[in-house]
Amino acid sequence: MRLTWHSFDLYWCVIVYLRNKIMAEIDVVKKVNSKRTTRKVVTDPVFGAHSAMSANVLPTYCDVMKAYLLRKHELKSASDRKEPSFTEVANSVISDIENLWQKSSIPIITHQKVMEKLKLYHDRYRNLLRPYKGRQHDAKYKAKIEDFLVHSMSQLFDIAACKCSDTANCTCEKERKVPAAERNFLEDQRHGRRMMIGGVDVKMTQRLQQRNKRKNMDFEKRAKFLALQSTAEAKGTCMSSSSSGEEEMSKDGNAEVEAVDSDTDYSAIGQISTQMRSPLSNLARECDRHGVSDRCAAALATAVLQDVGLVTGNDCAMVIDRSKVRRERKRKRKELQSTSLKKRLCGIYFDGRKDKTRTQVKRGKKSYPKIVVKEHITLVQEPNSEYLGHVTPDNGTFIFP
Ligand SMILES: [Zn+2]
């Protein structure tokens, strides 16, 4: 084939076209390569490679800063903007930190306070790096960076609301206190850092759910109480419903839950606590002396207070319920036992009589109540005729000398 001027022109056009296409491809590759960052770029001169926080432990300053730098890098590469602001990155990291702390059921400081804490540390970190390039090979500067890193790795980014060194003897408000079950974990995270956050604690979750249920029930009850109060005022009668309600609540098991609930703050609905907190030593002593039941004693005592005018339709704070009587009797017996044991005995006198006594008779594995006639020998200390106790012979009768 003979090459003509015309065909040469065509070839030239094709070559130019192909060259332009190749150059365009190279441009695209260059652009992609310029966006792709190497490990060297995401490595920090102080904290090393960036990484996300672990979900099993509370983060240290080092963990937080690594997560912060990673998030900053992600946000920067996600959009074409130059640099995301501190607040934007910090907000995202802080919500992760807060979630971790909430997972471990420890009360924390406010979001704003956490933000200030992180900002302070971030400023320290920035100041350390200013300037980095000029002195990066200086031994003294290297040691300074090393110290900063070691400190950040050992210190917990502590956002607990309670700052007491001894969490067991904490003096903070109730909402800020670390729950008893989490105290060891927080201590460990602050110092040794050997423990980890596990999966869901089924027992604890059930307990918390039960506690919340009780709280809600209590609020409902108080609201009902307020509504009924106005009608009771008109009638001039006292509503002892609150006391019977308390009895029902104290029946079922968990002592800890009870203790927490008894401290519930009702200020939210404007109701003064209706709990009877006075010690009732004399009532307890007389109940034991006359063998009156708790329920009967509670009814009698409340009736007297009502007659005296201490319990009215408007004020039910002094109502005594049977649980209160039971607790007071227990306390009084303990108190009497401890005081009588300290005394030195001078002379023992005794007297005896046959009493109808309530006992438990065992048949097989079960026990049944039974009333039997038993001989009771009463021991009395003289002088002052103080009752010491009584004894019962297992068989036969006691012979008085
Ligand atoms: Zn505290």
Image (cartoon, helix red, strand yellow):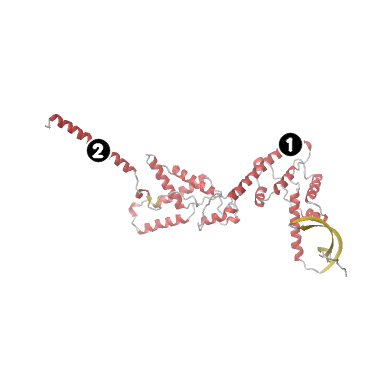
Q: Position of residue 116 (x, y in %)?
A: 48, 47
Reading the image, the residue beneath label 1 is 230
Q: Which mark is residue 43?
A: none
Q: CA distance from mark 2 to mark 1?
A: 90 Å
Tell me, yes or no, if residue 83 can be seen here.
no
Decide if residue 38 is on the left or right side of residue 330.
left
For the view shown, which residue lies furthest in the top direction? 6
Q: Amino acid at mark 1?
A: Ser
For the view shown, which residue lies furthest in the left direction? 2
Q: Position of residue 123 (x, y in %)?
A: 43, 49
Q: Position of residue 359 (x, y in %)?
A: 80, 57
Tags 2 and 1 touching, CB below 8 Å: no
Q: Earlier in the sequence, mark 2 or mark 1?
A: 2
Residue under the image location 35 percent in, 50 percent down: 40
For the image, the number of numbered tags is 2
Callout 1: few (<14), some (14-19), or many (20+) C-alpha neighbours within 10 Å? few
For the view shown, which residue lies furthest in the bottom direction? 401
Decide if residue 1 is on the left or right side of residue 168.
left
Nearest the camera: 233 or 354? 354
Q: In the figure, residue 29 lies in which quadrant?
A: top left
Q: Position of residue 231 (x, y in %)?
A: 75, 36
Q: Quadrant of the N terminus?
A: top left
Tell me, yes or no, if residue 216 can be seen here.
yes
Question: Against 196, is 375 above or below?
Answer: below
Q: Quadrant of the C terminus?
A: bottom right
Element on which disc 2 rests: helix
Reading the image, the residue beneath label 2 is 22
Q: Amino acid at mark 2?
A: Ile
Residue under the image location 86 percent in, 64 percent down: 351
Question: Against 270, is 359 above or below?
Answer: below
